[in-house]
């Protein structure tokens, strides 16, 4: 099948919510840089069909930074990490609410509350519940997504009762290669937590990290696994190779490959919220605006332990590319669903939550 026929087939399938074949998904990743704009244009048709030109803004608040007992190779907060990141214990509810307010003021519709660790103890769920209440008291319409690691029985229900709208737990990579990046928990553990979130009535958010040395087959495997899990939002992260982590030398992504990965994800998951997440500034660089034709959601400002571009720059980029920020009163999902070494590019977060400095929003 030539490229034109392939892209026409993928667009037709995307508009019908029909998945591509694995061979078609692999063919997207195998396209040349010369064909990149054709791939982006085709996937953009699917994105606009389901989400128009709206871009949802999300804002991260790192409730507890560093000191994690898990050994995820990609993470600067991992056990044994030598990354010189901010380390602090739980933010108080008023501190977290203040941090969230900066993101909401910048246009964020969803606040993502993240805490390092294997999973929350019951008292941690109490802490997060108090934080959710503090945020909702100030911003009644804001969505709150919790990301606390592996959930025990009943914890998802408690978070839902506390006012959480969503729960994030990424698959990160294919089942076949998961043991290569993490040994302290399993791929099945992650799948089980997503199922718990679903069962509790939380909007499930689960995605991947690209750039960890995986193959095209691994990327297709994890995206098809995500489609089977059926989360409402799929964040696509691009590895930020932090000094002091096992993957510090994994600088293999190009802006073009990142766009092909986003396009493939859009074709496989046509009607879910595809979020271009961590690492977009580092790896997409000046091609970030093209990602908006593929993803309908982005993070505003900084990430968990690294800095992003200024929130104002994000808003200007969205406007300049001809897109518009999604309003608090707008439904994100379609109605039927009602998800080479460049160390100079990585700036460790030193502002916002856990510091006395203003956040980047």
Image (cartoon, grey):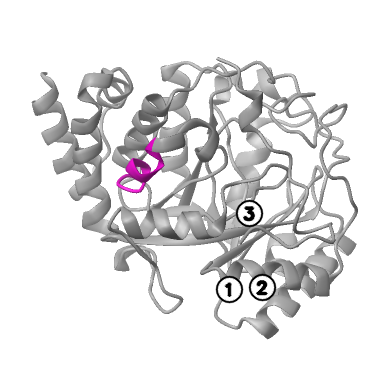
Q: Nearer the viewer, residue 263 or 182?
A: 263
Span highlighted in magenta in the image? 287-294
The answer to whether mark 2 and mark 3 are in CB contact below 8 A is: no
* Among the 4 quarters of the image, the one containing residue 273: bottom left
Disc ID at residue 101: 2
Q: Is residue 31 visible?
A: no
Q: Position of residue 243 (x, y in %)?
A: 75, 24
Label 2 or label 3, whichever lies nearer to me, is: 2
Closer to the camera in the image, 320 or 41 = 320
Residue 291 forms part of the magenta stretch: yes
Instruction: Say what secondary structure mark 3 lies in.
Output: helix
Q: Are marks 2 and 1 in contact (CB under 8 Å)?
A: yes
Mark 2 or mark 3: whose residue is earlier in sequence: 2
Residue 85 image offset from top left, x and y in percent? 81, 39
User: Any mark on residue 105, and which?
Assistant: 1
Label 2 crowd bin: few (<14), some (14–19), many (20+), radius 10 Å? many
Q: Which residue is mark 3?
A: 196
Query: In the displayed structure, would residue 190 be above or below residue 242?
Result: below
Report, in whole angstroms, how far the alpha carbon at label 1 lies from the one at label 3.
Answer: 32 Å
Q: Residue at left 34%, top 29%?
A: 260
Q: Measured from the top left, where is residue 288 in percent x and y?
A: 41, 41
Could you say whether the residue bearing mark 2 is in a helix, strand or loop? helix
**Circle 1 or circle 3, nearest the eye:** 1
Q: Main secondary structure of the magenta part?
A: helix
- C-alpha distance separating marks 2 and 3: 29 Å
Q: Earlier in the sequence, mark 1 or mark 3?
A: 1
Residue 275 seen = yes
What is the quadrant of the N terminus in the image?
top left
Image quadrant assignment for residue 91: bottom right
Q: CA distance from mark 2 to mark 1?
A: 6 Å
**Residue at x 48% of width, y 52% of height:** 298
């Amino acid at each position: 099948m030539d490229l034109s026929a392939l892209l026409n087939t993928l667009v037709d399938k995307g508009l019908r919510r029909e998945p591509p074949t694995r061979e078609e998904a692999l063919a997207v990743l195998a396209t040349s840089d010369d064909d990149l704009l054709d791939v982006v244009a085709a996937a953009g048709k699917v994105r606009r069909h389901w989400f128009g030109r709206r871009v949802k803004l999300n804002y991260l608040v790192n409730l507890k930074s560093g000191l994690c007992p898990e050994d995820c190779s990609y993470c600067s907060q991992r056990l044994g990490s030598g990354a010189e990141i901010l380390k602090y214990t739980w933010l108080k509810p008023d501190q977290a609410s203040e941090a969230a307010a900066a993101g909401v003021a910048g246009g964020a519709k969803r606040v993502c509350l993240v805490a390092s660790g294997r999973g929350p103890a019951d008292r941690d769920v109490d802490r997060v519940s108090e934080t959710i209440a503090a945020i909702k008291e100030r911003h009644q319409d804001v969505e709150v997504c919790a990301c606390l690691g592996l959930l025990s029985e009943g914890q998802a229900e408690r978070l839902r009762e506390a006012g959480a709208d969503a729960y994030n737990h990424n698959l990160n990579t294919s089942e076949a290669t998961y043991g290569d990046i993490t040994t302290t928990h399993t791929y099945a553990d992650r799948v089980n937590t997503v199922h718990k979130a679903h069962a509790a009535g939380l909007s499930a958010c689960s995605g991947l990290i690209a750039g960890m040395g995986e193959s095209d087959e691994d990327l297709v495997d994890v995206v098809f696994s995500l489609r089977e899990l059926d989360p409402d939002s799929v964040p696509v992260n691009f590895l930020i190779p932090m000094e002091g982590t096992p993957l510090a030398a994994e600088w293999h992504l190009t802006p073009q490959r990142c766009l092909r990965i986003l396009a493939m994800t859009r074709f496989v998951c046509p009607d879910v919220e595809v979020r271009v997440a961590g690492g977009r500034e580092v790896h997409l660089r000046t091609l970030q605006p093209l990602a908006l034709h593929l993803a309908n959601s982005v993070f505003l400002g900084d990430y968990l332990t690294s800095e992003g571009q200024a929130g104002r720059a994000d808003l200007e980029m969205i406007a300049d590319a001809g897109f518009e920020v999604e309003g608090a009163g707008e439904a994100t999902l379609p109605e039927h669903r009602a998800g080479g070494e460049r160390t100079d590019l990585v700036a460790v977060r030193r502002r916002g939550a856990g510091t006395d400095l203003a956040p980047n929003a």
